[in-house]
Amino acid sequence: MNIGLTGSSGLIGRHLMKSLSLSHNFIELDLRSKNLFDNQSEKHINDFGLVHLASLNSKINSEKFDDEIQITKKLIQIIPKLKIKFCIFFSTSKVYGETFNFVADESSQINPMCTYAKTKVIAENMLQEYCHDNNITLIILRLAPVISKHPSSNIGRLLTYLDKELAMPILSAGDSAERSYLSLPNITNAFDNLLHFLDKNTNIFQKIYNLSDSQPMSMNSLIKSYCEANDLDLHPVSMPDFLANLMFAIPSLGKKLSNKFSNSVISSKQLQIDLELSLIPSLKLDN
C-alpha cells in the first residue's frame, strides 16, 4: 500500500518506515517545503492513505501554540489536491488530562491541560470536520506516552540513566500509582493491522482509538522491568518518606513529580476488538 506520511523524521515516523518498508511504500510528505513530493513520488499521489504524524514536539509551550495548529491547517489546505483513501491522525492520550483516577476509554470526557494536548484536540476537530464534509474515512489514534530513549522525553532520560547502572533513587510513591505506556513494537503492530483493515473496508467512517501497551505499570515496575529485560544491574536507593514528602511540597518540583507518580491509565480494548489485535506489555523496550 502507498502511504503518504507527514512527520517521517520523528521517532515514530522513522520507526514505522524502518519496520514496514517491505510491506508498504512510504511517501514522505514535507509540510515545510513548497514541494510536498519529490518527483519520483508524484505518480502515487492519487492512490494512497494519508498518515499525519507531523508535530513540533510534545513539550511545546504556549508560545508555539499557533505554530503547532498551522501544521494541520496546512495539511488540510493540501488535501484537496490529493486523492486519498483514508486519513490516520496520531494524537495523544494527554487529551484526557495529565492524571486521572479512572481508566479512560474513548468515551471518557477529555480534559487537556498542557499546550500539546490542547493543540491535538483542535487538530482532531479540524480533521473530523474536514473528513466528514469530504467523505474521507478518518482514524484518530490517541497514544500513551511512548517508551524510547529519545533525549527530549523524561522516559528517555530515565532509561539512559539506567543504562549507566548507577544508584537509582526509589520513591515509595512509585509503587502505587500506575500509568499507561506504549512501546514501539505495539505501534508497529497496531498500525500495520489498521492499514490492512482500512484497505479491505470501503465504507466511509470516523473512529477514535486509544493505543497503549497491554498492561499499565507503576514507575518502579517500569524501572525494574527495563533493567531485567536488558540485563542491567539495578542499584536502588530507597528515599525516606519525609524527604519525598518535602520534594512533593516544593511547588515547581511537586507538580512535576505528581504528574509522574499519579494514575494515568487508558484502555485499548476497543482497538483490540475491532482489529482482533494482540498487544504486548512493556518488557523488551526498543531504543
Image: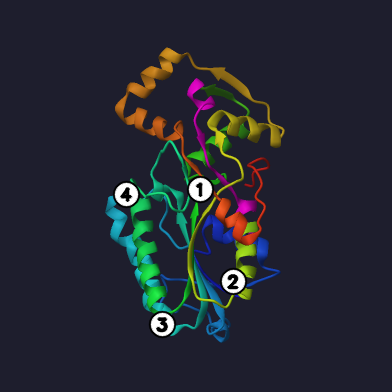
Q: Which residues are magenta?
A: 172-188
For the N terminus, which image quadrant? bottom right
Which SS class for mark 2?
A: helix
How far across and how far down the image is residue 122, in percent? 34, 60
Quarter-of-image position of residue 97:
top left
Q: Give whichever of discs 4 and 2 has the lower sequence position.
A: 4
Disc 4 from disc 1: Cα separation:
20 Å
Which amino acid type is marked by label 4? Asn
Dots 4 and 2: beta carbons under 8 Å?
no
Q: Is residue 179 magenta?
A: yes
Residue 51 within the segment the image draws in magenta: no
Q: Amino acid at mark 3?
A: Pro
Q: Quick one: SS at disc 4?
A: loop
Sequence-earlier tag: 3 or 2: 3
Residue 144 — which label?
A: 1
Q: Label 4 belongs to which residue?
A: 61
Residue 259, located in which quarter of the rendered image? top left
